[in-house]
Image (tube, rainbow, N blue to C red):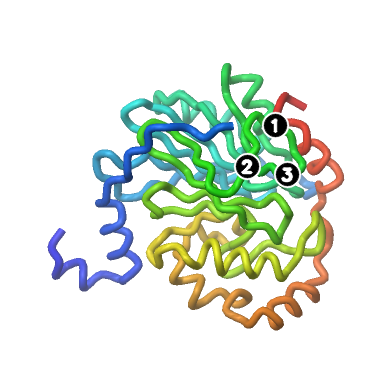
């Protein structure tokens, strides 16, 4: 695509095309260590990928408005799944099998309060699958993650950035080339996760986003754990300019978060206890 044509495109589109034309770095070692039910729906998205970039799919679970993300190395076929949901495990495995992938790690961005993770059921169905979550989450998993850890799949990796505030155990997974960040509930599109339960703290959340996410390259894509308005992706630059909460001062942000007066998630009394244990086995 010519430079002249790129310059005529919307800046975000232009940035996306340039981004996906970059190869990811080679990584050669692993880290140690509602009451009325609606049928789950599927949405698949992928970027404009050149040879060598990871395969990427974005999937959606409609009851909790949760995004699940699949990334894989196109050569080794090793794959990771971020924030799987119990009700859509069979859907996810069907896609993984259709694409000829080998799922090796199931990752959670935090201990969820609005749905039960699919990690336990996935471990029952996929031999050798490892689970991972922050060591500060209080939840069981094969791999307890800390700042700076990496999750390797083929020549690609996800780097761990601790982003507490919504909960103590929130992490953001960043691809090795810093082209994509999976921010969980810490940073949403034009919003952020609530801070009124599960050790939530508005000051910590504000600092986490500004120090660990807003310091990423401006063109880095933001992929959150949820969206309730049909939005699918943002960028660091967009959220730094347009996020109505996180563009405020710290004091203004704390005041906003302390006065949201939101109802409890409907499934919190079921989801949290289940999610504390099912990283090691099916519930």
What is the C-alpha distance between the residues marked 1 and 3? Answer: 14 Å
Query: For this rendering, which residue is in front, 108 or 86?
Result: 108
Nearest-to-viewer mark from 1 and 3: 1
Residue that mark 1 sits on: 279
Mark 3 element type: loop
94 displayed left or right of 260: left
Residue that mark 3 sits on: 115
Mark 2 element type: loop
* 282 w.r.t. 274: above or below: above
N-term mark: 2 or 1: 2
Nearest-to-viewer mark from 3 and 2: 2
Residue that mark 2 sits on: 108
Q: Residue visible at 53% across and 42% down? A: 149
127 displayed left or right of 283: left
Picture quadrant of residue 219: bottom left
Mark 1 element type: loop
Q: Residue visible at 30% across and 52% down? A: 20
- The crowding category of the residue bearing disc 3, from other C-alpha atoms within 10 Å (few below 14, some 14 to 19, many at least 20), is many
Picture quadrant of residue 73: top left
């Amino acid at each position: 695509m010519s430079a002249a044509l790129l310059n005529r495109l919307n800046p975000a589109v232009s940035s996306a095309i340039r981004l996906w034309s970059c190869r990811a770095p080679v990584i050669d070692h692993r880290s140690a260590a509602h009451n009325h039910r609606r049928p789950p729906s599927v949405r698949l998205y992928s970027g404009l990928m050149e040879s060598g970039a990871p395969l990427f799919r974005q999937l959606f679970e409609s009851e909790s408005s949760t995004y699940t993300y699949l990334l894989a190395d196109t050569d080794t076929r090793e794959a990771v799944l971020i924030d799987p949901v119990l009700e859509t495990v069979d859907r996810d495995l069907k896609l993984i099998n259709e694409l000829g992938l080998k799922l090796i790690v199931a990752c959670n961005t935090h201990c969820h309060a609005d749905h039960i993770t699919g990690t336990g059921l996935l471990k029952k169905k996929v031999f050798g699958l490892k689970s991972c979550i922050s060591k500060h989450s209080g939840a069981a998993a094969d791999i307890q993650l800390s700042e700076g850890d990496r999750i390797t799949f083929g020549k690609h990796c996800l780097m761990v950035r601790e982003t507490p505030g919504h909960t103590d155990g929130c992490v953001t997974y960043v691809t090795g080339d810093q082209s994509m960040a999976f921010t969980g509930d810490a940073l949403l599109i034009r919003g952020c996760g609530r801070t009124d339960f599960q050790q939530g703290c508005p000051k910590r959340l504000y600092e986490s986003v500004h120090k660990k996410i807003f310091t990423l390259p401006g063109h880095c894509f933001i992929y959150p754990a949820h969206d309730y308005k049909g939005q699918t992706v943002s960028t660091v630059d967009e959220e730094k300019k347009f996020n109505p909460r996180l563009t405020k001062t710290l004091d203004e942000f704390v005041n906003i978060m302390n006065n949201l007066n939101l109802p409890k998630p409907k499934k919190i009394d079921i989801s949290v206890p289940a999610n504390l244990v099912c990283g090691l086995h099916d519930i």
